Amino acid sequence: MAYTKSQLLESLPQVGKVEWIGIRAERRADVEPVSEITVDVEAGLSGDHYSRNGGKRQITLVQAEHIEAVEKMLARSVDPGALRRNIVISGINILAFTDRKFTLGEVVLEMTGLCYPCSRIEENVGPGAYNAMRGHGGITAKVIKGGTLRVGDEVRLYQEPEAVEVS
């Protein structure tokens, strides 16, 4: 059976997992890991310095498998906090969310762009980190529906609720 591109984009049966959550209270501060956090449509992640900004870059996410690739290239382990991303997910291709909505537990996000490595990556991770992270920097997202986000929550492609006919 031949599938259309649209059908293929809608078919993402894998279920990922939130592996790590981190926030920075202020600009240039260290990223502090948390096990759960409140997510708000206007404020993003509660307590994160981007929470005041709203907009398209409320949350940054990176894929655990990409961190593993970077670790292999650098021949050393990498602390997720050093990457300055908010959420690490595993088990699902993060780039499959391009221009899409997706869920992390009860929270709904929409991908807004790619997240490129910043100049601080070399100082945080060490020599070669900037180039190792290229293509593995993750994504940015905005909050569509808030809630409580926890390490261990499932990550899925968002499915619009089916309309219920009222008679």
Image: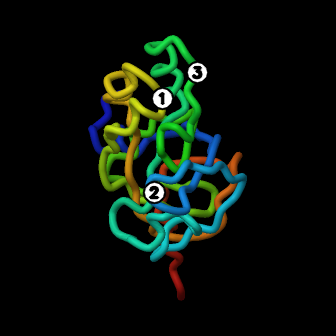
From mark 2 to mark 3, how far is it between C-alphas?
24 Å
Looking at the picture, does residue 7 appear above or below residue 144? above
- Circle 1 crowding by C-alpha within 10 Å: few under 14, some 14–19, many from 20: some
Q: Quickly name the residue at label 2.
A: 59
Task: Label 2, secondary structure: give it.
Answer: strand
Q: Can you tell which mark lies on residue 136?
A: none
- Mark 2 crowd level (few <14, some 14–19, many ≥20, 10 Å Cα): many
Q: Position of residue 22 (x, y in %)?
A: 59, 50
Circle 3: element type: loop
Q: Which of the two labelled residues, at mark 2 and mark 3, occupies the earlier sequence position?
A: 2
| Residue placed most toward the observer, 101 or 50 | 50
Among the 4 quarters of the image, the one containing residue 76: top right
Q: Earlier in the sequence, mark 1 or mark 2?
A: 2
Q: Which residue is mark 3?
A: 77
- Which label was assigned to residue 125? 1
Compute the Cα span from label 1 to label 2: 21 Å
Image point (44%, 39%), residue name: 94
The answer to whether mark 1 and mark 3 are in CB contact below 8 A is no
Looking at the image, residue 4 lies above or below residue 125: below
